[in-house]
Image: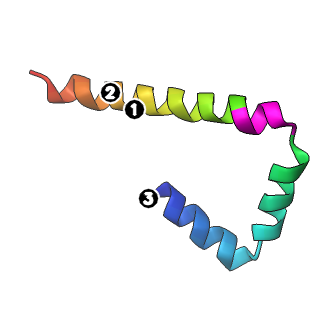
Amino acid sequence: MAGGLAAILLTWTRSWSGLWSWFVDTPRVVTLVALPIVIAAASIVASWRVLRRAAP
């Protein structure tokens, strides 16, 4: 849902070119290593919280 809202916001403000230029200008380590690690860590934390509440 957050990705869809981000896409709507980027389209509405016509900021897609700014996003792509940010990806091009950042070092490869950030986009290929750090960003996936941060996304994976956030997913693990969110999953852990949901599963802790679901289990009796």
Mark-to-mark CA distance, 2 and 3: 18 Å
Q: Secondary structure at mark 1?
A: helix
Q: Secondary structure at mark 3?
A: loop
Establish if 22 lies above or below 48: below
Image x and y of residue 38, in percent:
61, 30
Residue 48 is left or right of residue 56, and the answer is: right
> Looking at the figure, which quarter contains the N terminus?
bottom left
Establish if 25 lies above or below 11: above
Q: Callout 2: few (<14), some (14-19), or many (20+) C-alpha neighbours within 10 Å?
A: few
Which residue in the structure is indicated by mark 2?
Answer: 49
The answer to whether mark 2 and mark 1 are in CB contact below 8 A is yes
Please name the residue shown 75% across and 76% down the image. Answer: 14
Amino acid at pointer 1: Ala
Q: Is residue 12 magenta?
A: no
Q: Bounds of the magenta span? A: 27-32
Image x and y of residue 43, in percent:
45, 33
Which residue in the structure is indicated by mark 3?
Answer: 1
Image x and y of residue 36, in percent:
61, 34
Question: Which numbered disc flags the more N-terminal residue, 2 or 3?
Answer: 3
Please name the residue shown 52% across and 26% down the image. Answer: 41
Q: Secondary structure at mark 2?
A: helix
Question: Which numbered disc flags the more N-terminal residue, 1 or 3?
Answer: 3
